[in-house]
């Protein structure tokens, strides 16, 4: 199973306006546009807590390799 976090983040952010995201999270407008377009990003504390403020959590899960 291949999960792509970029697509998931873009999908979540596309449900809200840039102004709403900016007001709720404090992220800069350019960064929000990049995230909404699925551009690669750095997973830093600002993004982590911004997503948490919007009701989402990023989960790191270990997969078993055969």
Image (cartoon, rainbow, N blue to C red):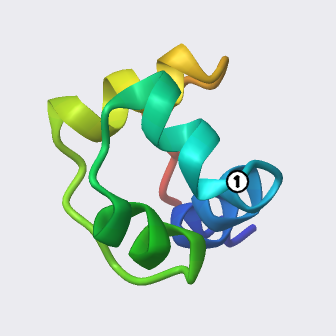
Could you tell me if residue 26 is visible in this image? Answer: yes
- Residue 22: image x %, image y %? 45, 41
Q: Which residue is mark 1?
A: 17
**Relative to residue 5, is residue 39 depicted above or below?**
below
In the image, residue 23 sits, relative to residue 28, either above or below, namely above
Closer to the camera in the image, 16 or 2:
16
Q: Nearer the viewer, residue 26 or 51?
A: 26
Residue that appears at 60% across and 70% down:
4
Q: Position of residue 49 (x, y in %)?
A: 35, 22
Instruction: Kindly identify the residue that appears in the image at 31 percent across and 32 percent down.
Output: 26
Q: Quadrant of residue 50?
A: top left
Q: Is residue 55 left or right of residue 21?
A: right
Where residue 47 appears, as percent x and y from the top left, is 32, 40
Sort mark 1 into few (<14), some (14-19) or many (20+) by Cα contacts within 10 Å: few
Q: Quadrant of the N terminus?
A: bottom right
Q: Is residue 11 left or right of residue 54?
A: right
Secondary structure beneath label 1: loop
- Residue shown at 31%/71% (left/top)? 30
27 vs 47, nearest the viewer: 27
Residue 39, located in which quarter of the rendered image?
Answer: bottom left
Name the spot of residue 7 as percent of width and height, x first.
65, 71
The answer to whether residue 57 is left or right of residue 49 is right
Decide if residue 59 is in sight here: no
Which residue shows up at 47% across the image and 73% down it? Answer: 33
Is 13 above or below relative to 34? above
């Amino acid at each position: 199973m291949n999960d792509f976090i970029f697509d998931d983040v873009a999908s979540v952010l596309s449900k809200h306006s840039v102004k709403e995201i900016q007001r709720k999270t404090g992220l800069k407008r350019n960064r929000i546009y990049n995230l909404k377009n699925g551009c690669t990003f750095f997973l830093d504390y600002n993004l982590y807590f911004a997503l948490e403020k919007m009701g989402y959590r990023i989960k790191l899960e270990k997969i078993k390799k055969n």
